[in-house]
Amino acid sequence: MPIAPNFTSILSKDWEINFTQCAPNGYLKYTDLCNILQLTAAAHSEIGGISFLDMQEFNQAWVLSRIRVEIEALPKWGDIVTVKTWINSLENSRSVRALEMYVNGKKIIGSETFWAVFNTQKRRPEALTLPFEHFELYPDTRATKHGFSKINLNHKKEIVFEKTVFLSDLDIVNHVNNVKYLEWCLDLVDEKLILNQKIESFEMNFLKELSLKDNVIIHESLNETETTFSITKEDKTSFALQLNWK
């Protein structure tokens, strides 16, 4: 699709939180929060002419490599949230995108995301084919207090779950959807911590693809202020999640 007439380098988009997106406490699920952030990023890429459909002409797609989310509060059922997004950097096969969520004009969530251009046939990163110079970049305007990082996995951990990848875990790029990893891990957390909104921030690192029928092991490492999960396939780490507690 061509660049939309209403294209702007900073996009604000409203979403209404519906009941299907909420946990039993009536507040937005962390997984659905990530979905809203990703849908907003996708909406910005669509009006900017670098959407999934545009990129598929060259067998390319954006895939999420790292994400950090900092949470002041979660929206609840019926809230209208405004998500604002812009690009910090974009070159060759990599892009850093910022996102912020507001309720009634107050910022409640900030996120920094790292995306890679992925060839969906060759299954590897490559430079973006489509033009992107029309996007103004904002390298110094950050959405989070801290940037994303490489999660440290060099600590004592234990096996807490084993799983097989099913069709329902896959997305349009034919690998495990980024939100599914988060869902698997949060299902292993004490539900009181989730329902009482004790997550202050979380980071995810996506390291290797997982595909249909893959058998994986989920590991957990605990301390007072954070919980780290890692998912391995054949002793190689595919995913890491760090939850920081209030």
Image (spheres, grey):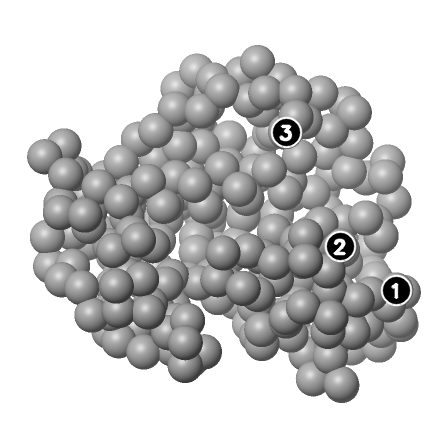
Residue 241 visible:
yes
* Residue occupying the point 53% across, 16% down: 79
Q: Is disc 2 in contact with disc 1, using a CB cutoff of under 8 Å?
A: yes
* Residue occupying the point 65% across, 20% down: 19
Q: Earlier in the sequence, mark 1 or mark 3?
A: 3
Q: Earlier in the sequence, mark 2 or mark 1?
A: 1
Q: Earlier in the sequence, mark 3 or mark 2?
A: 3
Report crowding for label 2: few under 14, some 14 to 19, many 20 or more residues within 10 A (C-alpha). Answer: some
The span from disc 2 to disc 1 (Cα, nearest Å) is 9 Å
Q: Is residue 1 left or right of residue 197?
A: left
List x then y, in percent, for residue 64: 47, 61
142 or 54, which is in the foreground? Answer: 54
The span from disc 3 to disc 2 (Cα, nearest Å) is 17 Å
Residue 141 visible:
no
The span from disc 1 to disc 3 (Cα, nearest Å) is 25 Å
List x then y, in percent, for residue 150: 55, 72
Q: Is disc 3 in contact with disc 2, using a CB cutoff of under 8 Å?
A: no
| Residue type marked 2 | Trp
What label sits on residue 161 in the rendered view?
A: 1
What label sits on residue 21 in the rendered view?
A: 3
Q: Is residue 70 above or below residue 60?
A: above
What label sits on residue 184 in the rendered view?
A: 2
Q: Secondary structure at mark 3?
A: helix
List x then y, in percent, for residue 189: 83, 49
| Residue type marked 3 | Gln
183 or 68, which is in the foreground? Answer: 183
Q: Quadrant for residue 133, please give it.
A: bottom left
Q: Secondary structure at mark 2?
A: helix
The quarter of the image holding the C terminus is top right
Q: Quadrant for residue 223, please give it.
A: bottom right
How many circles with numbers are drawn on the protein? 3
